[in-house]
Image (cartoon, rainbow, N blue to C red):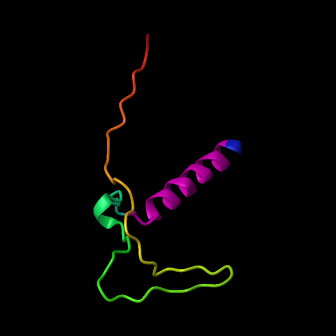
Amino acid sequence: MIWAALIVALLAAVYVYSSLPSTPSKKPPSLADLQTPTVEDGREILMVFGEVVINDNNELWNGDLQTTPIKTKSGK
């Protein structure tokens, strides 16, 4: 009797696994995907009082954006 239950459970697991939708692999984000604000001539500067979230700020410099590969040494 226990063998029949194990076979039914195994068949159910195979059916559920085979009916799952496949997810497409996503490309990891790169530096080109960043949306950083830029300085434009004639753009108004906001004056904010209090605590406010600003999504459209005017940024002069955002840092030296670059990627470096991760190198790890394993073992001794």
Q: Nearer the viewer, residue 17 or 58?
A: 58
Residue drawn at x 35%, y 63% is 24
Q: Nearer the viewer, residue 26 or 59?
A: 59
Residue drawn at x 38%, y 74% is 37
> Furthest residue to the right?
1
Residue drawn at x 49%, y 80% is 55
Q: Main secondary structure of the magenta part?
A: helix
Q: In the visual, does 64 lie left or right of 53?
A: left
When the figure is inspected, residue 22 is found, relative to residue 74, above or below; the finding is below
Question: Does 5 appear in magenta?
Answer: yes
Q: Nearer the viewer, residue 63 or 36?
A: 63
When the figure is inspected, residue 17 is found, relative to residue 54, above or below; the finding is above
Q: What is the quadrant of the C terminus in the image? A: top left
Q: In the visual, does 44 lie left or right of 6?
A: left
Question: Does 74 appear in magenta?
Answer: no
Q: What is the quadrant of the N terminus in the image? A: top right
The magenta span reads 3-23
Q: Where is residue 15? Give x, y as percent.
A: 50, 59
When the figure is inspected, residue 6 is found, relative to residue 19, above or below; the finding is above
